[in-house]
Image: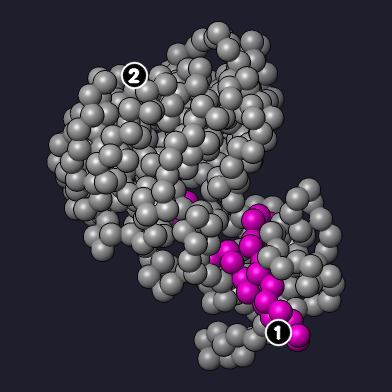
Amino acid sequence: MKQHPGEIEIASYDYPLNEDRIAKYPLEQRDLSKLLIYKEDEIRESVFKNIGQELPENALLLFNETKVIQARLQFFKDTGAKIEIFCLEPVAPTSEIQMAFAQKSAVIWKCFIGNSKKWKNGKLTKKLIIDGAEVEFYAERKGMDGEAHLVEFSWNPDHLVFSSLLSHSGLVPLPPYLNREAEKDDIDRYQTIYAKQDGSVAAPTAGLHFTDEVFDSLESININIEKVTLHVGAGTFKPVSSDQIGDHEMHTEKIIISKSTIENLLDKKKDKIIVVGTTTMRTLESLYWYGVKLKIDENALFKIDQWDPYQEKYQINDCLEDVLRVILGHMNKYELEVIQGETQLMIAPGYDFKVADILITNFHQPKSTLLLLVSAFLDGNWENVYDYAINNDFRFLSYGDSCLLFKQ
């Protein structure tokens, strides 16, 4: 590797994105979004509903089945000041996301707070009607954790679970670049049709284009479907503010992968692997590096740090099949049906992809880590793709159009 990715200048990954190119709302029909196809240095376009015509038969397609939670909560002080609380991740009594949602007593979450200067202390109260009964919902600051605030949520009566409070009082956490308030339709549209595992504060947007009809078309060409979970954090919107990406700290996200998914990956190792979105890509590549760590140390934790793949000690150059067998051996030994871990993985130009052959993704923000991932996958040819999209009226970002990229 000629240059460590940490030395990359983020200014090289800028491009002009005018406000009118950002899709503020989704199309009425999910699968009518435009589809840019990049294969063997050629660019052409189609419509997403026809994506099955572009994919190889007998491939394995993997998507992220995380579900966006209504993570934005609005409280009002007695003075009338609006305090907005953005729930990031649970801390106590558990950091496990599903258990945190099932709590019937007070919970503490890491949060961002809007208008925090107006809320120094004291308990905020919000009255709700849930199942015909009045519920009082409370929020109280409990300190800081890095850049995040610790907020304790409690409620009365306390027979309700926390997820019920969120679903009845929370708002859809739309990306800040949409510059609008969430609307009723966003509850459905800022969610994939296959979303299942509560836990994300941002949608894995490449999946927003899929419909039942698209899945039927994939089934007709014997494409096998598998799923993983990566709970998308607010850090996905964090811009790279440093000149070099080595000074940018990647956000940590929780991932969950089942034994059956790994077994299917192993069975399909000779066929093409298609990943839906950058979150699925980071999950699968993190899985590979976990296997490498297990091979070096059988007690290794499933925790992938930002620069792990670029460290010489992990360059054992094992093929995907060998690494997956190591992971399955570990799971069999400890009778695990799923593995859970954390990843901070930074995929940037110079990265050697281990799993995916084809990537389905949206168009990403300038100077973002997601754009770095796309550049790495296309061996630096991202500008040709984005120039074409800009010059041919493609819609950008979360509610925008999509592209189908074949690895260079």
282 relative to 102, above or below: above
- In the picture, measured across the screen, residue 145 lies left or right of residue 297, that is right
Q: Quadrant of residue 247?
A: top right
Local packing at callout 2 (Cα closer than 10 Å; few below 14, some 14-19, many 20+) is some
Mark 2 and mark 1 in contact? Answer it, CB < 8 Å. no
Q: Can residue 161 be seen by looking at this rendering?
A: no
Determine the CA span between mark 2 and mark 1: 56 Å
Assign a secondary structure to mark 2.
Answer: loop
Q: Position of residue 329 (x, y in %)?
A: 53, 24
Q: In front: 2, or 291? A: 2
Asked whether residue 353 is drawn in magenta, I would say no
Quadrant where the N terminus sits is top right
Name the mark on residue 408. Answer: 2
- In the picture, measured across the screen, residue 255 lies left or right of residue 84, that is left
Q: Which range is magenta?
A: 64-90
Q: Residue at x 37, y 23 (%)?
A: 381
Of the two numbered discs 2 and 1 on the same chain, state the one appearing first in sequence. 1
Q: Majority secondary structure of the magenta segment?
A: strand
167 relative to 355, above or below: below
Q: Amino acid at mark 1?
A: Gly
Q: On the image, numbered disc 1 is attached to which residue?
A: 80
- In the picture, measured across the screen, residue 377 lies left or right of residue 39, that is right
Q: Residue at x 67, y 18 (%)?
A: 297
Q: In front: 377, or 363? A: 363
Q: Position of residue 378 (x, y in %)?
A: 38, 23
